[in-house]
């Protein structure tokens, strides 16, 4: 075992992790208050390099994100209490092979629909009580093959697969820990839904039946730096009562019973947001489905076993289907823009009047 003393560092970044690995380290000694960046922590975990806090009695495996390496091993694993030890062999079962193919197919759909760019987006599936198959970091979702995928436990430690897991896996893991029904999560950046996310708005309800049934109320979680514990936890207040959350200034996350269904929800939300934007350009108000007919849709949704905050009747007393307040959200109907065909902007009108006047003057020979 080669141990390298890095107790002089206040911050351990990717550069330090790489050079330690190049030197063949299997253990890094760091000071109690040393901050380890998420990417460095991931890199060290991937290369089985342990982080040991100066003065700690024994080496602990690299802790999951957001947990200080100074914590004793018992505290580090406290989140895993009651969970069985992860079983890496699950990664090679026929069920896992089928899931891997489904994840690759869904990855390709996300890319083809322009829901992801570069290496953006990530997909996961909870195959066991403490085992989650997920996409790797730095691979386009179009190019995914089953060999690219990896498996982590619910604390984010990689237990199978050769490529490093996505750094955004913790967002998915928080959902799996909070929602027992969630079997798959899809995170992506579809442009029209993300347009809502960057304006801090959620789309209005009671406009299109399919959206009411499959998604309904969308929540919006506050912005945090991707890959951090704080980011992963932003969705926690919403995921029990919503299957789709807009991530402020980032994108969306959907969960479902299968990988394919989680991707469907991304499609339904994106098309809904897009349609609302197109409707806004028509310059006339949207027609809404009545509250009464909306209740029929909610009943269909309940039969399908999908979550909806509007099932909470205690919150329905003072609110209606269409305007129930979701913590952290601002529900606004997109307003028609000035340049829309139905309502020309003032500058457009001025130009139109001028060109008509010019044409008339020319015809009567005044020019
Ligand atoms: Zn993202």
Image: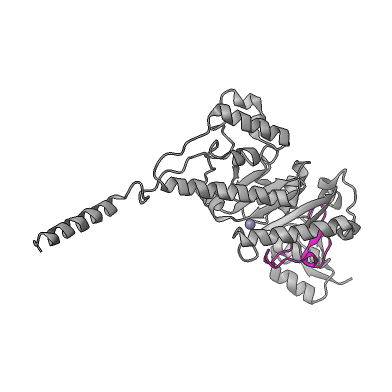
Q: What x and y, as percent, mark residue 144?
A: 73, 66
Q: Nearer the viewer, residue 194 or 79?
A: 194
Q: Quadrant of the N terminus?
A: bottom right
Number of disc labels: 0
Front residue of 43 and 218: 218
Magenta-drawn segment: 136-162
> Taking 20 as reference, is 359 above or below it?
above
Residue nearest the observer in this picture, 350 or 7: 350
Image quadrant in which you'd find residue 70: bottom right
- Residue shown at 9%/62% (left/top)? 365
**Magenta stretch prevailing secondary structure:** loop
Q: Quadrant of ligand 1?
A: bottom right
Q: Return the residue found at the far bottom.
A: 23
Please tell me which residue lies in front, 113 or 15: 113
Q: Residue at x 66, y 54 (%)?
A: 187
User: Residue 301: percent from the left, percent from the top?
Assistant: 67, 35
* Magenta highlight on residue 77: no
Name the residue furthest left: 366
* Residue 51 in picture, x, y percent from top left: 80, 62
């Amino acid at each position: 075992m080669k141990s390298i003393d890095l107790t002089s560092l206040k911050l351990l970044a990717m550069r330090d992790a790489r050079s330690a690995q190049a030197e063949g380290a299997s253990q890094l000694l760091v000071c109690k208050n040393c901050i380890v960046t998420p990417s460095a922590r991931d890199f060290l975990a991937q290369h089985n390099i342990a982080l040991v806090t100066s003065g700690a009695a024994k080496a602990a495996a690299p802790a999951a994100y957001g947990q200080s390496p100074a914590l004793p091993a018992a505290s580090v694993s406290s989140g895993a209490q009651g969970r069985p030890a992860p079983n890496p062999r699950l990664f090679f079962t026929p069920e896992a092979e089928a899931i891997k193919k489904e994840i690759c197919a869904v990855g390709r759909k996300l890319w083809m629909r322009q829901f992801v760019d570069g290496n953006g987006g990530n997909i996961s599936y909870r195959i066991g009580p403490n085992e989650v198959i997920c996409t790797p970091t730095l691979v386009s979702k179009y190019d995914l093959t089953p060999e690219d995928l990896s498996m982590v436990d619910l604390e984010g430690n990689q237990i199978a697969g050769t490529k490093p897991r996505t750094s955004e896996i913790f967002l998915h893991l928080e959902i799996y820990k909070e929602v027992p029904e969630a079997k798959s999560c899809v995170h992506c950046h579809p442009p029209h839904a993300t347009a809502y996310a960057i304006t801090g708005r959620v789309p209005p309800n009671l406009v299109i039946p399919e959206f009411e049934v499959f998604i309904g109320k969308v929540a919006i979680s506050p912005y945090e730096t991707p890959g951090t514990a704080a980011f992963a936890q932003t969705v926690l207040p919403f995921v029990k009562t919503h299957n789709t959350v807009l991530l402020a200034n980032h994108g969306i996350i959907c969960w479902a019973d299968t990988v394919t269904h989680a991707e469907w929800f991304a499609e339904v939300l994106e098309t809904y947001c897009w349609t609302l934007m197109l409707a806004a350009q028509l310059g006339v108000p949207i027609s809404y489905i009545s509250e009464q007919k909306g209740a029929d849709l909610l009943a269909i949704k309940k039969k399908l076993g999908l979550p909806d905050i509007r099932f909470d009747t205690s919150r329905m007393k003072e609110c209606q289907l269409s305007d129930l307040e979701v913590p952290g959200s601002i529900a606004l109907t997109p307003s028609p823009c000035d340049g829309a065909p139905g309502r020309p902007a003032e500058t457009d009108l001025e130009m139109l009047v001028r060109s008509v006047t010019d044409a008339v003057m020319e015809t009567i020979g005044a020019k």
